[in-house]
Image (cartoon, rainbow, N blue to C red):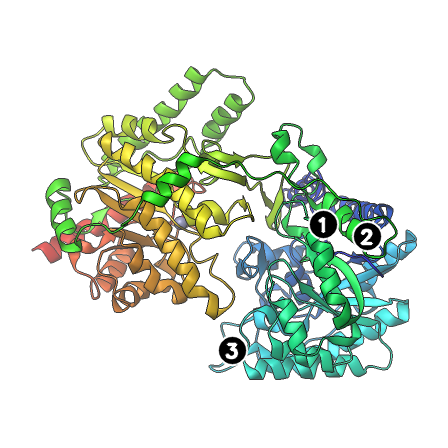
Amino acid sequence: MNTTILGYPRIGARRELKFATEDYWAGRADADALLKTGAELRAAVWNELRDAGLDAVPSNTFSFYDQVLDTSVLVDAVPDRYRDLTGLDRYFAMARGVQDVPPLEMTKWFDTNYHYIVPELGPDTRFRLADGADAKPLAEYREAEALGIETRPVLVGPLTYLLLAKPAPDAPEGFRPLDLLDGLIDVYAELLERLAGSGTAWVQLDEPALVADRTEEEIDALARAYTRLGRLTSRPRLMVATYFGTIGTAALQRLSRSRVEAVALDFVAGPGNLDALASVGGLPRKTLVAGVVDGRNVWRTDQRRARATCASLLGLVDQLVVGTSCSLLHVPIDLDAETALDPDVRGRLAFARQKVTEVIAVGRALKEEVPAAPEPLAAAAGIDRAVRERLDSIGDVERGDRAARFAAQRAALGLPDLATTTIGSFPQTPEIRRARADRRAGRSTAAEYERAMKDEIARVIALQEELGLDVLVHGEPERNDMVQYFAEQLDGYAATEHGWVQSYGSRCVRPPILHSDVARPRPMTVEWATYAQSLTSRPVKGMLTGPVTMLAWSFVRDDQPLAETARQVALALRDEIADLEAAGIRIIQVDEPALRELLPLRDADRAAYLDWAVGAFRLATSGVADTTQIHTHMCYSEFGEIIGAIGALDADVTSVEAARSHMELVGDLRAAGYANGIGPGVWDIHSPRVPAAAEMEENLRRALRAVEPARLWVNPDCGLKTRGYRETEASLRNLVAAARRVRADVTG
Ligand code: GLN
Ligand code: ZN
């Protein structure tokens, strides 16, 4: 093999898998129809990759939901609560739950926006190859073989699988999934033997966990696993793939000593991999798959640079294979489907299909099958001098003294203790979605659309007044998505028509592309916000998406540091905030739900990240008067590493997800030095359940042990756009009642 890729999108060029799966869930199609779509999609990918001229084609990269969930099913790590179900129904129950049976947890796959289903393991978990000869990797291998295509099955590596798992809720204290390694290796051994029996030449074992910090014990586990698998007498050749960063030298050392035949390293997100290789003396008897084509971003490969990287590796390894940095799962499928993109931007892009061609081109050039023709260099990104000069001239991004701000805002806003509010969005009804779709398709006029949105805003304001909330929101009916809405209005961003990427299960997102310097040609939210404020005397919050989240949920230019791009977005937001303030908006919320998500995988890189992330937030928010109150919102319950940074953002009020962790976060935040207002979510909006007032009251009383009444805010965990009006009204009524009761007690 000379060229390969680590994986390919599975959703289909027209999101066929999404629609087939959702038809199955809704009972509109039977299992056979879904299975047939799956088989067609797999065949299409294999054929496409073979026809493109790729030497080694991966298989088992298809999934009806997620590859980690597939692995749990493969090794029979199925918690008892799903055991009554079988086949696809069991599989989807583990992913999504069924009536009375909650799903497994879902969380983000490393630092990507792809979500995997978290394995739940306990001391009683007994791994076995659940489907024997029909196990998925075997079945898919044979399926491709029947089409005349030899493939390399891809498996989640045993170490990564266990490190991504969590102890079952009833597991005894101290149990760790890693304790189950030996039993898991038995199953992998059986699978490898069976694959060898079917004629499989190569298997890929994905071990991205090796690019994060690992303990000595974990490295020993790695060595144990691959020593055992390496020694199997009958097995395919093994390729251990890491991606999303630089592999630790200890891990690389162990792999180099093991009998695995190939190692794949990421030379895009892991520029340190060259040094790592050199420091272990290379892999003189092994094949290296050099990930030089970026699997996670949408830019064309600089082929000259890719070839140079490969050339620098030649002396360090026995054989070199050109590959992608990671699976192409994370990029859209086909640039050719985009007809409306600006040609300059388009010329800089490559999606999955194009990246396969790039891998092949680099491979051919290395073998000198084709002369190394100079390719046109990618056009430079658009430069906006005004933006750059303004950024250079902005100095201090400190706000005034905290105590002074607190006093000024209390006087200006006149809010009660335990002020009640919501996070921004109200339920997105079918009518709202239809109004937006009609406008996009040109079926309604701008004026009609504006009327529909304003009517909705008026309804939401009236409802909040009736419910008795203290700080209101306009409800965000005009926003399809909290990032896309702003991306569409900022210069430097482009939207795709078909650039879908799987986020989890059947859910796909279409991240905008941040390709050039960012600038704000005109105000983005002021009209909606001022209209909402004109309807009420209570303060209405202006609602913006923060710079980190704007980057995290987009494809971002890679020709300058993320920190620099974040500052450009922050400057645009700073201007928006100034306009909101000038228009009479007294409270402005800047959401940063993705602050945690972009946290680097390695400890050593985290301080620098948090530094620029906090700096960008402060650049955006520090231009306002002391009387203007800045809020922020974040939604995840494991704040751990970033708890200090939350204080550094210096928002006047921070609302956070806390309902499921019983308010513990409030104490944790205070302990970490956070001294401003806190709105710990008292209603878990991820479930349709209506929490009783007494339950929220208890949460508030618990929070009051760590924060004084004037700094405690009462709000749900997150925005309400996915909820229905029935539970929203009932829950908010309870929330206001709970706040009033507790307020009456503490204010005397
Ligand atoms: N303001 C946004 C909303 O309410 C926040 C969404 C989020 O935190 N993801 O929808
Ligand atoms: Zn949220």
Q: Is residue 299 left or right of residue 659?
A: right
Residue at the disc numbered 1? 303
Q: Where is residue 732 drawn, in percent x and y? A: 30, 44
Counting every numbered tag in the picture gives 3
Q: Quadrant of residue 114?
A: bottom right
Residue 42 at x, y percent in the picture: 79, 49
Q: Residue at position x 41%, y 28% from top?
A: 521
Residue 425 placement: quadrant? top left
Residue at image mark 3: 171
The image quadrant where one finds the C terminus is bottom left
Q: Earlier in the sequence, mark 1 or mark 3?
A: 3
Residue 340 shows in the view? yes
Secondary structure state at the residue bearing disc 2: helix
Find the distance from the CA under tag 1 to the CA under tag 2: 9 Å
Residue of label 2: 365
User: Going 84% across and 69% down the picture, which residue do you hit?
Assistant: 195
The residue furthest left is: 748
Amino acid marked by disc 2: Ala
